Image (cartoon, rainbow, N blue to C red):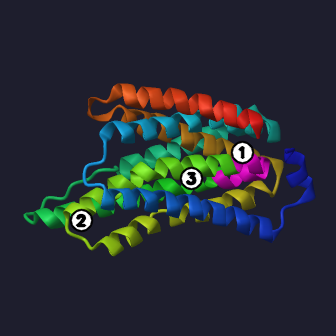
Amino acid sequence: MSILRYLYGGMGLDEILMITLVGLAAGVFGTGSGTIIALFVNNPNQATLNFILGFAGGMMLAIVMSDLLPEAVEAGNFLIAFTGLMIGSLFILALDIKLPHFHFFETADELARHIRTGTILGLGIAMHNFPEGLAIGASYVASPAVGFTLALTIALHNIPEGIAMACPLCVGGMRKRWILVYTALAGFPMGLGALIGSSLGSISPFFLSISLGFAAGAMLYIIFGELIPGAQNAGQGRAGTFGAVFGTISGILLLSVI
């Protein structure tokens, strides 16, 4: 679907609301699904989780390289797209420096330590979900098919994030219903990001280009900084590697038929 239709045809509030709801659903249901798995599966198979991480990373990589970056350049030019990419990458780098995913507090209470660990991890996930929401919103402006595919992919990679957040909370003795609520809340910033991404992306070619570039940069950092390394965790390298390969191929094939 052509970018020009959205640039000159305009995007109504109902369309922006729909994109916001899609982003919100991807964040909430993604992390929420991971929480349900963590609550009912005592010892999730590490190889399976690594495969899911690798698959999500591979599919996201296919989307970034096949759609986000080309659409960013098409909407504006290479310089604008590259500027957005660098800003997106540096933004996620700043989050990683200021708020690492895993941060343990010194405390004599072991249960409290686990709960605090899960809380800090959830805050990190929430902050990472915002630029992912930008990716969904900006992608929808360029192509609804690509935006929806990206939303599904992000929801998929949010499953292990939900598991990672829920596990220390479970060990810390938090009630299951509150664990589900807190992990679902971590997905809310994705809806906000989708709202902003779709709103800015529909204003002008410049904002569309820089929004798509920002999304691509954020996604590349998350892919190579989190998903791919995480997929090689606990000595299950082959599972993560095959997941990444299968995810990349699946992403290319999916994008070729939508």
Q: Which residue is mark 1?
A: 146
Q: Amino acid at mark 3?
A: Pro
Identify the image quadrant of residue 120.
bottom left
Q: What is the residue that sits farthest to the left in this orientation? A: 108
Q: Amino acid at mark 2?
A: Ile
> What is the distance, in whole Å, between disc 2 and disc 1 at their CAs?
37 Å
> What is the distance, in whole Å, between disc 2 and disc 3 at their CAs?
26 Å
* Image mark for residue 115: 2
* In the image, residue 105 above or below residue 211: below
- In the picture, measured across the screen, residue 189 lies left or right of residue 49, that is right
Q: In the picture, which quadrant includes the N terminus?
A: top right
Residue under the image location 83 percent in, 67 percent down: 12
Q: Is residue 203 magenta?
A: no
Residue 154 point in image, percent of width and height: 55, 49
* Image mark for residue 198: none
Task: Specify few, some or many for label 1: CA neighbours under 10 Å numbering under 14, 14-19, or 20 or more.
Answer: many
Task: Specify few, some or many for label 2: CA neighbours under 10 Å numbering under 14, 14-19, or 20 or more.
Answer: many
* In the image, residue 43 above or below residue 59: below
Q: Which residue is mark 3?
A: 131
Q: Amino acid at mark 1?
A: Val
Q: Is 113 in front, or is 240?
A: 240
Helix, strand or loop status at disc 3: helix
- Which is the main secondary structure of the residues drawn in magenta? helix
Residue under the image location 42 percent in, 36 percent down: 51
Magenta stretch?
Answer: 136-147
Helix, strand or loop status at disc 2: helix
Residue under the image location 40 percent in, 49 percent down: 160
* In the image, residue 109 above or below residue 212: below
Q: Earlier in the sequence, mark 2 or mark 3?
A: 2
